[in-house]
Amino acid sequence: MKLQYITIALVALLFTSCNDFLDIRPTGKVIAETGEEYRALLTYVYDKVPEDRGMTTLRSDEMAADASTMSGYDYDSYYDIWNWTDYNRNPSALYFGWRRYYHTCYIANYIIEHQREITKATDAEIKQLVGESYMLRAYMHFLLVNLYAPAYTNCTPETTRGIPLQLKADVNAVLSCSSVADVYKQILNDIAVADEYMNVEKWEQGYNYRFSKDVVSAFRARVALYMGDWQLAFDEAEKVIEKYPALQDLVASTSTKPTNYKSVESIMALEQIITTSISSIGYVNPDLLSMYRTGDQRKSTYFKAKTLKQWVLRKEKDDYDNERCSFRSGEFYLIAAEAANELNDKNNALKYIKELMQKRYKATNYNTYSKALDAMDKDALREEIAAERQREMAYQGHRWFDLRRTTQPQITKVYTTADKTEETFVLEQADARYTLRFPTEAVEANPGLELWQ
C-alpha cells in the first residue's frame, strides 16, 4: 500500500545526544504556520510511529526459529528479542522503540500547544488536527506503558511504577514516571478530549492511517480490555460493531486477509503489523498451528507450508505493506464476547463469538463447534474465547499483550544451531521479563528515570 504521505521539507528533527532522558533535540526549527503545513507535520509523524506491535510477535509464543531461518543480520538483530535476553545483549541487536514514541509525543504536543497560531485553515480543520494529536499522544503512551510497565491487570496500578508522561513540547524537561493507574487515566482523558475535537467520522481508504471519530470507541474498548474494565470494554466494543459490523467472509473467499487495509473490517490502518524481515527469520510455532481446527479457514489464509515441517506467514500479493492494521472489526467481536462472559452475560458472549466464527469456519464445522459452546460454563467459555482470540489475532501484534494481561504463562523455546545443538530458553510464569527494561541510554541520561514516588 502506498499511503498518501506528503514529502516534508519544512521539518528537520533529528535524534541527537542531549542531557534529558528522552535524548531528543530538534536541530532545526518547526516553522509550520498554515493548516496545510501543520497537516504535513502531522503526516510526517504518522509515518514515524513505531511499528513495535509487530515485533512483539518475536517475543511471544507464536514464532519458532532455528539456524536455518535465523542467520547473519537476522540473527544479530533479532535473536535477543526472540529469546528474551534483556541483559548483556548483542551490540548489534535491535530493541523496541523509546525515543521514537516520545518524538511522536513531542510533535503532538507542539500541535496542541500552537493550535491558536494555525493560519489559513477552517476551525473544523484545526480542531481535527488537534484531536488527532491527542489521539496520537494517547496511543504512544498506551504502547509504552504496555511494553515498559507491568500489566494493569497483574499489578496494583495505583502503587506500581509506570512510564513517563510527556504532556508538553519541552525537550529540556526531565520527566519522572507516573503510576500505571495515572498513565491509564491520562490515556482515557486524552481520548475523551480528542473525541470533542475531531469531526471527521471516517477517512477514505488510503488516508485511514489517520485517527478519526470512529476510532475513539475502538481505542477506548482496547484500553478498557487491558484494564479489565469489562463493562466499559463491552459498551465501547458494541459501539464499534454497530458502526463496523462487517467481517471478512473467509468461508466464501480467502483472497483478502482481515488485516489488509482494504478489508471490509478495516477501521484504522496505521501500523504495518509484520515486516518482511521479521516474517523471514522464523516459522509458525507448531503449537499455534495445531490450534486451528478442521474447517478453520484462517490457517490457510494467514499461513502457508514452506516445508513439510515449517509453515510461514502468507504474504498478501507478495507485499506485507498491504497488511496495515491498527484497529479492525474482528477484534471487537472478540472483546465484546470476552467482556460479556466476564459480566456473566453468556447470551451476548455466545452471540458475538459465534458471529465471528461463522465467517471463519466451514458451515458443517461451525455447527459442531457452535453447539459445543452452548454447553460451556463461564470458565470453559473464557478459555474458548481466548483460544479464538489467539487463532484470530495470530501474528498481528496482540499475543504478547494478551499474555501479559492474563495468565503470563511459562513459555519454552528451543533453538537448533547449525551443528544440531539445541539451546533451550524459558520465560517463567509471571517472569519479570514480561515487562521490558527501560533502555540503558535513557537511564544513564536520567538516573532517576525509574523512580516515580
Image (spheres, rainbow, N blue to C red):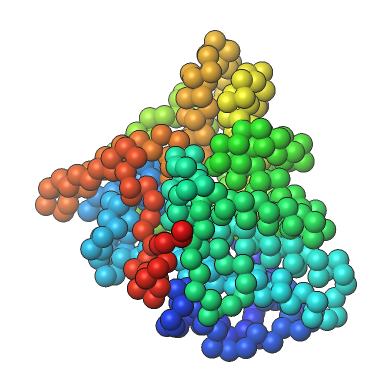
Residue placed farthest to the top in the image?
A: 375
Extreme front residue here? 453
Q: Would you identify the image quadrant in which residue 332 lies?
A: top right
Q: Is residue 226 above or below residue 435?
A: above
Rendered residue at 55%/63% (across/down):
165
User: In this rendering, is residue 184 above or below 168?
Assistant: above
* Residue 14 percent coordinates (x, y): 51, 82
Q: Give the total number of marks visible in the rendering.
A: 0
**Residue 373 occupies which quadrant of the picture?**
top right
Q: Return the x and y of residue 190 as percentages of the image width and height.
A: 68, 57
**Residue at far right of view:** 122
Taking depth in this image into account, of 149 and 10 the one nearest to the observer is: 149
Residue 208 in view: no
- Camera-side residue: 222 or 418? 222
Q: Is residue 296 above or below residue 22?
A: above
- In-front residue for pair 248/409: 409
Q: Where in the figure is residue 185, as x and y percent of width and height?
A: 62, 51
Tell me if I can see residue 387 in this picture.
yes
Is 224 displayed left or right of 114 in the figure?
A: left
Horizontally, residue 207 falls left or right of residue 394, namely right
Q: In percent of the image, x 70 and y 50: which residue is there?
A: 215
Q: Where residue 220 appears, x then y in whole percent?
A: 66, 46
Q: Residue furthest bottom?
A: 28
Please say if 450 is above or below 10: above
What residue is at 52 percent from the left and 47 percent from the top? 158
Is 335 situated left or right of 192 in this image?
A: left
Q: Quarter of the image containing the N terminus?
A: bottom right
Q: Quadrant of residue 450?
A: bottom left
